[in-house]
Image (cartoon, grey):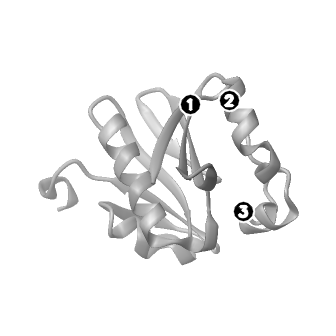
Amino acid sequence: MDIIKLEGEDQQLYYLVAHLVMNEDVLGYNQNYPYKTSSDYLWFVAMDKGDILGFMPVKLEEGKAKINNYYVTGDDSTVFSALLKEITTTLTAEYELESVTQSRHIPDFEKNGFSVSLYWKRYAKMKAFKNEKECL
């Protein structure tokens, strides 16, 4: 599996994910909330032999990197881990990393260094910690 990083308005991004972000099943996965992008986003796309396994757009603003409205085929834990590891490695030195995580995916994020800071009905706000002391 390869993780590709693309700017939010990169033409290759549209080529790779447009068929997914407009698909009814993928939109349903995202609670029917549309996917967004702009020049403020960095997208992490998981691929294997030309197939898109998932993606996580990350909005970069005001010292924070915010994961929201992601997709992982079949909720595959391996894909979640690969995407989150790449995001964490790439961004935590410069940004405070947060996520709006669907409730069913909380365990996948927790396995990858995130902790819940706020629960909502269908989502949780989560934060990645750079070291164990920050968790305390």
Q: Return the residue at label 1.
A: 6
Residue to which mark 3 is pinned: 30
Does residue 37 appear to the left or right of 114 in the view shown? right
Q: CA distance from mark 1 to mark 3?
A: 21 Å
Mark 2: few, some, or many residues within 10 Å (few <14, many ≥20)? Answer: few
Which one is in front in this view, the residue at disc 1 or the one at disc 3? 1
84 or 66: which is nearer to us? 84
Residue 4 vertical position relative to residue 85 in the rendered view, above or below: above
Location of residue 57 in the rendering, given as x and y in whole percent from the top left corner: 59, 43
What amino acid is labelled 2 in the image?
A: Gln
Q: Indicate the secondary structure of the residue bearing disc 3.
A: loop
The answer to whether 124 is drawn above or below residue 127 in the figure is below
Amino acid at dot 3: Asn
Name which residue type carries label 1.
Answer: Leu
Task: Work out whether mark 2 precedes mark 1 in sequence or the reverse, and give the earlier one.
Answer: 1
**Of circles 2 and 3, which is in front?**
2
Query: Residue visible at 33% across and 53% down?
Result: 128
Residue sitting nearer the eye, 25 or 99: 25
**Residue at screen point 66% across, 24% down:** 10
- Mark 2–mark 1 Cα distance, whole angstroms, equals 8 Å
Where is the N terminus found, in terms of image quarters?
bottom left
The residue located at (68%, 29%) in the rendering is 12
Disc on the earlier residue, 1 or 3:
1
Which quadrant of the structure image shows residue 51?
Answer: bottom right
User: From mark 2 to mark 3, how far is it between C-alphas?
Assistant: 22 Å
At x 69% / y 24%, what residue is drawn? 9
Disc 2 marks which residue? Answer: 12
Q: Is residue 124 shown left or right of residue 121?
A: left
How many numbered circles does the render carry? 3
